[in-house]
Amino acid sequence: MEIVTKIAPLCLAIIMFSLGLGLTINDFLRVIKYPKNFLVGFICQVILLPIIAFILINLITLTPEIALGVMIIAAAPGGVTSNVLTKFANGDVALSISLTAIVSLISIATVPFIVFHSANFLEIEILKEIAMSSIATKMFFVVTVPVLLGMIIRKLKQDLVMAYESLFQKISIILFLIVFTAIWVEEWGEIMSYIKTAGLISIILNITMIIIGFYVAKFLVSGIAQRKSISLECGLQNGTLAVYVATQLFDQKVYLFPTAAYALIMFVTSIFFVLLVRKIN
């Protein structure tokens, strides 16, 4: 896990910087202009997703470490990948970007809250001497600060940033893949010993949230493009952030395995979902 521990914070900061490069103040003002669409997506991702994960870890027999690993990935916000796949699905990209941006920014509060309370419920002691406020502060510097820097640079060099926007998105996805390739390569033997339980709950959680996001949005948001966007936001999590949080709190690599399984599964299910819905108008 040594390589992952060293590269995850840097990769996460670069990914969040790339997210900031794609944002403008209008992305945040859009939330005020179309509050209903955003609120439905927000509730699905920030509230329903952890609740569904919590229900599943109580229904499926898991070790406490795997169960907490599931809660860590469930607490993570959506990633840049959701914005890219929303575009391919002919979904509402602006809504996707707004959800990713705002949920990512508030994740410095929501992620520690969910993870620490889940650890208490599962009776797992966080051995590293780190408080909820401390992990929130660390997340602020690798999540919020890079996003704000990216937004500032976009404001100052808009033409240059827009010319290379797709390149920045590709770099983010490549960095994401590097982190998870490193996990699978470094911990192949141990991951395979846990893959049955970690993989099972990951695929159930992922597919459940894609379906819930799609059908909750069906009854509450303005159109099919918004349904696609919310569904993908619910199914695609920022795995790099989950890895960062897990490695900051624990030395044991077992907490990473649900995230490693989820990251692999979410790409497959989300691409299948995009191919299924992209022509639906």
Image (cartoon, helix red, strand yellow):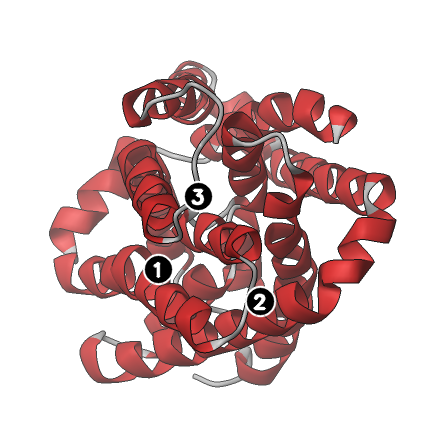
Q: In the picture, which quadrant includes the C terminus? A: bottom left
Q: Nearer the viewer, mark 3 or mark 2?
A: 3
Image position of 136 with respect to 79: above or below: above
Q: At 56% across and 71% down in the image, what residue appears?
A: 201
Badge 3 marks a residue whose secondary structure is: loop
Q: In the picture, which quadrant includes the N terminus? A: top right
Badge 2 marks a residue whose secondary structure is: helix
- Residue 64, horizontal then vertical, whole percent: 51, 55
Q: Earlier in the sequence, mark 2 or mark 1?
A: 1
Q: At 24% across and 40% down in the image, what residue appears?
A: 28
Q: Earlier in the sequence, mark 3 or mark 2?
A: 3
Q: Earlier in the sequence, mark 1 or mark 3?
A: 1
Residue assigned mark 2: 202
Image position of 101 with respect to 69: above or below: above
Q: Amino acid at mark 2?
A: Ser
State the residue in front, 247 or 99.
Answer: 247
Q: At 44% across and 43% down in the image, what residue appears?
A: 124
Image position of 147 with respect to 219: above or below: above
Q: Amino acid at mark 1?
A: Pro
Residue assigned mark 1: 50
Q: CA distance from mark 3 to mark 2?
A: 20 Å
Apparent side of residue 279 relative to residue 131 in the rendered image (left or right): right
Q: CA distance from mark 1 to mark 3?
A: 18 Å
* Label annotation for residue 42: none
Residue assigned mark 3: 124
Residue 266: quadrant of the picture: bottom right
Image position of 26 with respect to 234: above or below: above
Mark 2 and mark 1 residues within 8 Å of each other at the beta carbon? no
The reply to whether residue 89 is visible in this rendering is no
